[in-house]
Image (cartoon, rainbow, N blue to C red):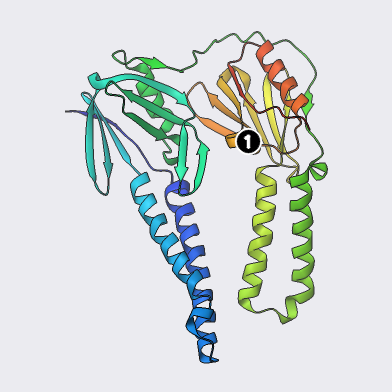
Amino acid sequence: MIKILQSKFSIKQVILIPVTVMLFVCFLLSILTFFSIDMTYDGTPLYKTPIWAVLIFILLLFFQIRFYLKTFKRYNFFDKGFEIRTIYGKEFYAWNVINQVSLINTPIETILWLIQNEDALVFEMKDGQVIKMFSKYYKNMPAIRKYIDDKNDLQVVNNYQVSNDKGFKPFEIKTFKGVLVLTFKGFILIFMSLLFSILFLEKLDTMTIVGIVFIVGIITLLIGVLVMQGYYFQLNKKSLIIRNHVFFHLKHQIDLNKVRVIYFEQKYKKEPSIRIITNDYSMVSFQSISVKNKQWKALISELKKHGLNVVDELFYENK
């Protein structure tokens, strides 16, 4: 067999995020273990110390490592089929056992107790087996999607054929945004960030290194969530512009002529997000907690008027 293409792991998703999470769990474990030992020296029975929390975190760490080892799969594509490799072994699937391939899909991914829809390339076998290749784990997913789309011997669906002439109508720039601080989540995140910042400045002289790291970590996390979910959108005759409420200088400009499909979605009724897949199958996504129902509908309507492929999976609830 001739190897044609091999998947390449995303450093962020496969190394940075898992290692960061595991280091954080280990950090909590060390603090709880220290307190448990210290309490036993003071005469507290072991069962009354946080040792039970230590055992729970050890169990969580075990299942987390096991999950990552099973989830991170390497795909090798050959002229006769494709191969999936994990630490536990490998499996080969010939092209003729595939019923169809859904090129752009949003199946459910289960991460420990978290259930959510994620962008994926889905292989549906003739025997009913379904293989989900989640795009966030592979940095060369655009190349893999293009390779699958170009194979003439596969039944490919959901590839969203591209129209070169979108027929854009000229208009002035339109903005679709809300007031971040007036949303419930935005207000809570801003309030908590200010509260912890004031606490940090007032107690800085008396805080230990562990306390400083803990408070700074919480503030960073709160601001990070606010930035990731604080986007809003602008539209002109040729581009979709994404800006941020927190970092005003952030600007992503998407050429609408290079867009294959735009998904508007909510993962299990969480914060609405927009996922943009370009002609070369590159993908970017942005969340927004400030944009209201009528603004989402207006943005979707404008995009559809210009012949763009739009998939609307938002939950429109009364606000």
The image quadrant of residue 200 is bottom right
**Residue at 59% of width from left, 17% of height from top?**
257
Q: Where does the image place residue 193, in percent across and percent down from the top left?
A: 75, 58
**Residue at 76% of width from left, 76% of height from top?**
203
Q: For residue 29, say whether it is visible.
A: no
Of the pair 110 and 237, the residue shown nearer to us = 110
Query: Helix, strand or loop at disc 1?
Result: helix
Q: Name the quadrant of the C terminus.
A: top right
Amino acid type for the residue under numbered disc 1: Lys
In the image, taking residue 163 as reference, residue 140 lies left or right, namely: left
What residue sits right under mark 1 in the picture?
Answer: 269
* Disc 1 crowd, CA 10 A, few/some/many (<14, 14-19, 20+): few
Q: Where does the image place residue 145, in percent across and percent down from the top left?
A: 40, 25
Question: Is 99 rendered above or below residue 6?
Answer: above
**Residue at 44% of width from left, 60% of height from top?**
60
**Residue at 69% of width from left, 78% of height from top?**
207
Q: Where does the image place residue 236, in percent across and percent down from the top left?
A: 73, 20
Question: Is 121 rendered above or below residue 250?
Answer: above
